[in-house]
Amino acid sequence: MILNMGPQHPSTHGVLRVILEIDGETVVRLMPDIGYLHTGIEKTCEAKFYQQVVPLTDRIDYLCPLTNNLCYVLAVEKLLGLEIPPKAQWMRVLLNELTRINSHLVWLGTHALDIGAMTVFLYCFREREEVLKIFEMVSGQRMMTSYFRVGGLALEPPLGFFDRVRDFAGIFPERVDEYENLLTGNPIWLMRTKGVGQITAEDALALGASGPTLRGSGVDIDLRRDMPYSSYEKFQFKVPLSQEGDVFARYMCRVQELRESIGIVRQALDGMPEGPIKADAPHVVLPDREKMKTQMESLIYHFKIITEGFQVPAGEVYQAVESPRGEMGYYIVSDGTAKPYRVHMRSACFANLQTLATMCEGKLLADVVAAIGSIDIVLGEIDR
Amino acid sequence: MPLAPPITDIEQLKNHPAVARLLGWKDSAIQSVKFDRDEMTIFVDRSDIRDACALLKNDPECPFNFLSDVTCVDWYPSEPRFEVVYHLLSISKKERVRLKVHLNSSSTSIDSITSLWPGANFFEREVYDLFGVRFVGHPYLRRIMMPEDWEGHPLRKDYPVEGYR
């Protein structure tokens, strides 16, 4: 029988349609059908200036908007050859890790909810509320922050920001203990997740999976540690690894990543350098507002950057970062004008989704839901 | 810091593992190279692409075993019109390389690399859907983002940003 796990479904985490061919309770074949959220962001980017693309990038992987911002901004800065001041880099790391925590909280809550554990969902969203308030404090927006700009940050972090983050970092580790208390030793959770959705390391590599989907099968690659960007080399953190390759292994990877991320946030708070938050490049970076209101030169720069954009030397660049889902990359081709010629987003979930067929074919129907949750897909990233 | 100018001289770059491996296979494998902003780009002929990818994937010293991305750039109206771009990553040696193939608008088909990396499946379907480049040997070359009955290839430069509604 061909069963349609249609685009509207509470467990598909977005508008994903999975066409299942089942024989009784066993899945014979599985095919994901995507494209329901395709909005042509890659095409739209070609019609906008480089700084106007930043809000578009938020909406691609909408659970970790700051990571998308970071990847795009790093790529453009690589094209321009800009050097970013250390304070901006450390702030980027701090907010990137808070975004990772945010994304993993949504993953944990919705994954547990699909499998039946509803309490975890409410607990996770309680912590998420605090992080969203922190984002609102720094950028004015809860989710689509667009806080990173080409050349640094958009605004100075407000007074009281670091204390708030420190308070959050103080309470968070014991909350992670709460989640683990509810799930890790729970016999129902173990029965639903151990041995389910298994994928070997060779299969995962061949299918282009990355992030916890790959690390859950034993392949040790993390772009933050191995190909560091934005001063990640100055931070100490472990990269969790599992060997079994099933849903439980990926769950353990991500829960450990929650703990590691809050450790990085603490290190960033303790060692935050002083200094400017924007690079010294008047043609690219908007001037300070006070200077813009009093000095003619700054006003002219401001006007030119906003209305005509900044020219980027011709060339191409591929910048990849470690998003909560895996390797997110931006391939930007510039032809020397103020608008990008081609922006391509290599989304982690697009490749990770291909592992679903290998994980579920020949197994039970109920395990499909667990497997979809464990890959942690976000349709905004898949469809763009 | 100011940008270093790109290096396009193959003599200076032949120590890079990917370049060395392809030159060791045959001298005509590499049409040109460019090392710009710390990234190595190698231009390959379209008939060589599958063999080049297989060689790089199985290289003993620096195996480029992870396919990061397959995408395409449309340079309408200049010829060659399409440039199919492959990004490879070596997980053990932490090296990246970019392979590019030029395609004219009259012959927009290229060998599929799904036999080497099954993960190229979705990427090649996306390039087919949005650019119209056919991949010979792909197991299921259908539209992936746009609906099946859509006409036209949206990411081509002669397709308007607003669409045809």
Image: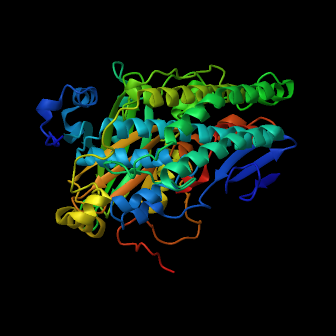
Task: Give the image's coloring scheme.
Answer: rainbow
Q: Is residue A154 above or below residue B11?
A: below
Using the rendered view, name the quadrant where residue B146 is placed.
bottom right
- Is residue A327 visible from the viewing direction of this image? no
Q: How many marks?
A: 0
Name the quarter where the N terminus of chain B is drawn. Answer: top left
Position in image of residue A244 (x %, y %): 66, 21
Query: Which residue is located at x 38 percent, y 66 percent?
Result: B156
Q: Is residue B23 above or below residue A329?
A: above
- Is residue A257 visible from the viewing direction of this image? yes
Position in image of residue A44 (x %, y %): 42, 65
Position in image of residue A70 (x %, y %): 42, 45
Using the rendered view, name the quadrant where residue A196 is placed.
top right
| Horizontal side of residue B47 vs B159, given as left or right | left
| Horizontal side of residue A71 vs B138, given as left or right | left
Query: Which residue is located at x 36 percent, y 66 percent?
Result: A48
| Horizontal side of residue B35 vs A165, given as left or right | left
| Horizontal side of residue B100 vs B151, given as left or right | left
Q: Which residue is at the front of the view, A206 or A227?
A: A227
Q: Which residue is at the front of the view, A309 or A359?
A: A309
Q: Which residue is at the front of the view, B78 or A224?
A: A224
Position in image of residue A336 (x %, y %): 21, 59
Residue lying at the far bottom in this picture: please name it: B165
Query: Which residue is located at x 28 percent, y 54 percent?
Result: A285
